[in-house]
Amino acid sequence: MNIIAIFIAAILFITALIHVGWGFGMLWPATDEQTLIKTVIGSPNITTMPSLGLTLFVAAGIAGAGLCALWGARVVNLPLPEWMRLTSLIVLAVIFTVRGIMTYLPIGPLSTSLEPFKTLDQTYFAPLILVIAAGYISILILR
């Protein structure tokens, strides 16, 4: 169970760091802002990268989800009640499951995604998100 939690946390902490980089103007994995938007956001309605504040807020949420995996598996201890630990695992399992499944639905916010995001999402992002969801479910079951 600890290995699962550490895997989830590592992936999410790296993802959070990438978001921090984007917030401060990093263009990777693209070379210009428009290509970055099409690659990592993929929404036809977005023409500029989100603000620094919003991007840092998202990064904090992603990092917090990673911390919850470690807390859920008791790799780290937080001075919070047990019901919060279990609730956070359940909520995160649901969020990651729904996000992963949404990629493959013919309707919904991801159904109109632009390329190359659409292909990257179907091939890499959503499968990894579903693995993370399964990890949270595993932590819940094995606790």
Image: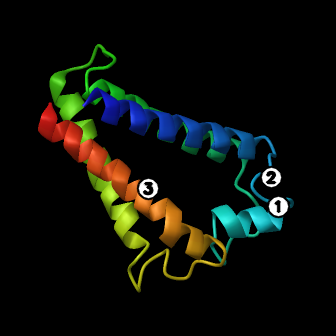
Residue occupying the point 73% across, 46% down: 22
- Indicate how the structure is coloured in the image: rainbow
Tally the marks: 3
Q: Give residue 28's position: percent from left, percent from top.
A: 77, 51
Residue 105 lies in what quarter of the image? bottom left
Residue 85 lies in what quarter of the image? top left
Name the amino acid type tagged 1: Glu
State yes or no: discs 3 and 1 in contact (Cβ < 8 Å). Answer: no
Name the amino acid type tagged 3: Leu
Image quadrant occupied by the N terminus: top left
State yes or no: discs 2 and 1 in contact (Cβ < 8 Å). Answer: yes
Residue occupying the point 31% across, 20% down: 75
Image quadrant occupied by the C terminus: top left
What residue would you read off at disc 2?
27
In the image, residue 12 sits, relative to residue 36, either above or below, namely above
Q: How crowded is mark 1: few (under 14 residues within 10 Å), some or many (20 or more)?
A: some
Residue 141 lies in what quarter of the image? top left
What residue would you read off at disc 1?
33
Would residue 124 be found to the left or right of residue 73 on screen?
Answer: right
What residue would you read off at disc 3?
128
Assign a secondary structure to mark 1.
helix
Q: Residue furthest right?
A: 32
Assign a secondary structure to mark 2.
loop
Q: Which residue lies furthest to the front in this view?
A: 3
> Which mark lies nearer to you, 2 or 3?
3
Q: Residues within 10 Å of mark 2 (few under 14, many from 20)?
A: some
Gap in angstroms between the C-alphas marked 3 and 1? 25 Å
Q: Residue 21 carries which label?
A: none
